[in-house]
Amino acid sequence: METIITKIDRKKPDMEVIQQAGKILASGGIVAFPTETVYGLGANALDPKAVEKIFKAKGRPSDNPLIVHISSQEALSALVSEIPPVAIPLMKHFWPGPLTLIFPKSSIIPKEITGGLSTVGIRYPVHPIAQKVIQAAQVPIAAPSANLSGKPSPTKAEHVIHDLKGKVDMIIDGGCSAIGLESTVLDITGEIPMILRPGGITQDMIEAVVGPILLDPALESRREVSQATVPKAPGMKYKHYAPKAQVEVIVGEVLAVTQRIQQLIKEDKSHRKIGVMATDQTQSQYEGENVFVLSVGDRKQPETIASHLFDVLRQFDEEDIDVIYAEGVPEVQVGMAIMNRLVKAAGYNILYV
Ligand code: TXA
Ligand code: MG
């Protein structure tokens, strides 16, 4: 399949490109576009054949439900059978933005979207290109992250091109995704809202608006799903975010972490190519013949770590690194989402120091 690849200015987008994307989507095609979290691969959410193309292009398991994206709050009511009262303040504070809310679904949502569940995830992105593409399509847009299933989510068009060129109708290059981690997924169908996937909108931010909420117990587990509680977001149980290299996360106080990584480098006699995922504060402390060091961001500004994480994992692949030692970060605020993605990239391979 020929993939149309077009660059577009985030602030002054070429409306012809947007119209073209809208037409492709409305006629059953699939289009990758930027959002504030990660790039999405969109299809008409009400067209099961179009939705199936997404699963095929990504190699995604069919029981993993898709989030439906809208470009106005008015579009919500047709898609859900009920709007729980707690949704009102949440939408007011966080929409448009990186918060996906799980509602009881309405009958127009095809089963291909929900993987057979009776609920549907809805997100109203704030990114201007995402909004304009959805508007132009004039239908709700199902959009998972635009990566091959199992790979790190794409935060740049290059990542999407690498994974999906030739498999999708169009890729819109709108620059880097600012947040860099997928949206927070919050289930509001129960008595108390529950975070199913941590993201840029943190537990504290949500609790400031609606009071105490819950965390899916599976998120607190550091073990693989086979041995732990099954997560409520089906996608959270799959191997994810994995670069080609083996990843090991080193968790502890910064000083102990850097010392342990230095020691691991020194003691390695295998001639493997070693990657170190460091931070601005620590990157100068690693050296060695086969060692390739990248800083993922500033420990004092964890949002910078969130926004670079997936890109840095992919950069190690470009360098054909065999093993990546990654510094853990404190699991507070957005650090929770960062560590959630990182330990999955590592296949739960964690070293506590
Ligand atoms: O930021 C994002 O959410 C991006 C951009 C493109 O909007 N999209 C994204 O989609 O991350 P995806 O498909 O890669 O991840 C969706 C996650 C999966 O873990 C899925 O299992 C969960 O949301 N999910 C979707 N619908 C659900 C439902 N009805 N109940 C529970 N979990 C659901
Ligand atoms: Mg994904």
Image: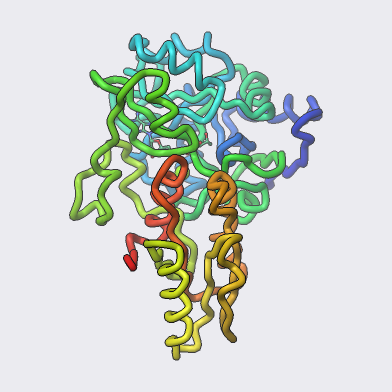
Residue at 34 percent across and 50 percent down: it is 238
Is 246 positioned to the left or the right of 317 in the image? left
In the rendered image, residue 79, in percent from the top left (x then y), is placed at 43, 15
- Left or right: 158, with 11 as reference point: left
Q: Nearer the viewer, residue 98 or 137?
A: 98
Viewer-proximal residue among 49 and 55: 55
Q: Looking at the image, which residue is at 64% across and 36% down?
A: 33
Q: Quadrant of ligand 1?
A: top left
Q: Quadrant of residue 296?
A: bottom right
Dividing the image into 4 quarters, which one contains the C terminus? bottom left
Q: Quadrant of residue 77?
A: top left
Q: Position of residue 175 (x, y in %)?
A: 71, 43
> Which residue is situated farthest in the bottom direction here?
269
> Observer-nearest residue: 104 or 303?
303
Can residue 81 be spotted in the picture?
A: no
Q: Is 28 rendered above or below residue 228?
A: above
Image coords of residue 151 (percent x, y)? 48, 55
Q: Nearer the viewer, residue 152 or 216?
A: 216
